[in-house]
Image (cartoon, grey):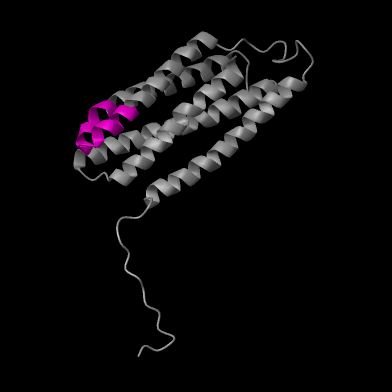
Amino acid sequence: MADSTTIRARPVKGPPIIESELLAMIIFVFADVMFFAGFISAYALVGARAPIGWWPPPGDPALPVAAAGGATVALLLSGAAVFQAGRAAKADLAAARRPLAVAMALAVAFVGYQVFEFVRLSSGGFTLQSSANGGFFYTIVGAHGLHAVSAVVVLGWTQRELAAGRLTRAAFSAIRLYWYFVVLLWPAIYTTVYL
């Protein structure tokens, strides 16, 4: 007879319901959604409370709506390429390499445009300190840009791990979720800040 203090462990059957990599990314993305929701809401509230004709503040340059729209298309196409990589990987993880390369090239183009835009606007006097609009612009767009840069680095790591045959499906799922977040967040930023 078993002693009453003995605890019997039940055998675990089947794979976990959700892989730890994906669960961690879901939690991270949820926290980041709250971060950006706070900044975007603050931007919208400041703009809504400003007198008519005073938001954005007079003297602030017009933001490059058309050029940023082109960058938006590149980013959305990058997201579509990552989606295609996920579909291709269902049969064979190595099949994801080509669509991931396309996604990465489009992501680099988006980040490159953001850097060019920041340099051009700041050299024209539109800075973090020039106005509340400048502060919001560089904080919101800059934070997204940092996410995009980190995602490009992660996509590069993913390519390397795929080539070496070390990438797990769970890690690939988490990476795709992060990229979808970066891609799908941008239209909300673009329509709020640029339009």
Q: Which residue appears farthest toward the right when viewing the image?
A: 51
Is 54 displayed left or right of 102 in the figure? right
Q: Which quadrant of the figure contains the C terminus?
A: top right
Picture coordinates of residue 168 (x, y %)?
27, 46
Q: Does the magenta stretch mainly form a helix, a strand or a loop? A: helix
For residue 5, say whether it is visible. Answer: yes
User: How many marks can you see?
Assistant: 0
Picture coordinates of residue 106 (x, y %)?
36, 21
- Residue at point 43% right, 87% down? 4
- The verdict on residue 95 being magenta is yes
Q: Which residue appears farthest toward the front when viewing the image?
A: 1
Q: Nearer the viewer, residue 75 or 64?
A: 75
Q: Which residues are magenta?
A: 82-100
Picture coordinates of residue 166 (x, y %)?
23, 46
- Residue at point 46% right, 31% down? 182
For residue 128, say whether it is visible. Answer: no
- Residue at point 48% right, 21% down? 114
Q: Which quadrant of the figure contains the N terminus?
A: bottom left
192 lies above or below 6 = above
Picture coordinates of residue 127 (x, y %)?
62, 21
- The verdict on residue 50 being magenta is no
Q: Nearer the viewer, residue 163 or 83?
A: 83
Query: Residue 130: which quarter of the image?
Result: top right
34 lies above or below 78 = below
56 lies above or below 11 = above
- Residue at point 37% right, 20% down? 77
Is 159 displayed left or right of 192 in the figure? left
Query: Residue 148: which quarter of the image?
Result: top left
